[in-house]
Image (cartoon, rainbow, N blue to C red):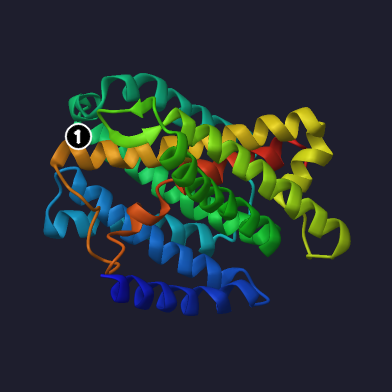
Amino acid sequence: MLRQRVITAVVLVALLLPTLVADSSLPFSLFALALAVAGAWEWGRLNSLKHVSALAYAALVLAGAVATLVFDGALAQPGVGWAWLTVVWVMLCLVLMPQGPQGWGRLPAVLRLLLGLVVMYSTWLALTAARGVGVNFLLSVMCIVWASDVSAYFAGHRWGRRKLAPTISPGKTWEGVAGACVGVLVLALGWMLVEHQVNLGSPSIFARALKDFGVPGLLFIVTALVALGVVGDLFESMIKRVVGAKDSSRLLPGHGGVLDRVDALLPVLPAAMAVLALGGR
């Protein structure tokens, strides 16, 4: 299993790095599109679609993205649309999380599938738009999720007592979430110190938040992004529990599926773009 995980990670990094350093954002956009289409296929499979139907469902995300690229709107900012999408994520959390997996299962299949299309398309668009802002901005957003996961794991393992969502993900604790917030705040401080000394080509999400909203705004935004990452993780776990699946698929040997790897990014990416839009890019 470890060997599979390492090989898969190396292959993904080998595919990702050239797209990040390319002069154009198009290679990264296509890489992100492959992930979004695969994630849509997994979403369809987790919500009752079989074989050809799941492929056709994923093709809808592909068609929407291709249309966006053809009409040269891939780097366009939907403005406050990002903020509204973030509000939708928060509402889903408030309404469905207290109900556990049963709440998701009670939603009509059509609504669950429509939500999937919106989520996967907006994730692709947010990834493309973030790469358009700059590699430093994109990586700083992604590192929020990675640092949050690592910090939450160690804090939860050491101090975890109170369960966060026992019916959805029994291993997560409130102490882990607190540790994630502290870990990402440390990351933000370190990142901005490096930015102060080195020109990284584009501002990070931390620098933009500090510039546009001040220290209180930075603290709020970092905490909110950590919380949204937890929401994304729990949301995918909830969907899988409805159908009794351990992984979203086996597309990534040793890692499960695409949704298993990007679940926390699903709400964080649009929220990061909302920070730019509301800050007056």
Q: Is residue 68 left or right of residue 236?
A: right
Indicate the position of residue 193 as horizontal and vertical percent values: 82, 54
Residue sticking out furthest to the right: 197
Q: Label 1: few (<14), some or many (≥20) within 10 Å? A: some
Q: Quadrant of residue 63?
A: bottom left
Residue located 80% across and 59% down the image:
194
In which quadrant is the N terminus drawn?
A: bottom left
Indicate the position of residue 152 as horizontal and vertical percent values: 48, 42
Query: The disc labelled 1 sits on which kind of residue?
Result: Ala
Which residue is tagged 1? 109
- State whether residue 73 appears in this view: no
Residue 34 vertical placement versus 13 (above, below) = above
**Towards the viewer: 125 or 21:** 21
**Towards the viewer: 65 or 127:** 127
Residue located 84% across and 65% down the image:
199
Residue located 83% across and 40% down the image:
211
In which quadrant is the C terminus drawn?
A: top right
Residue sticking out furthest to the front: 158
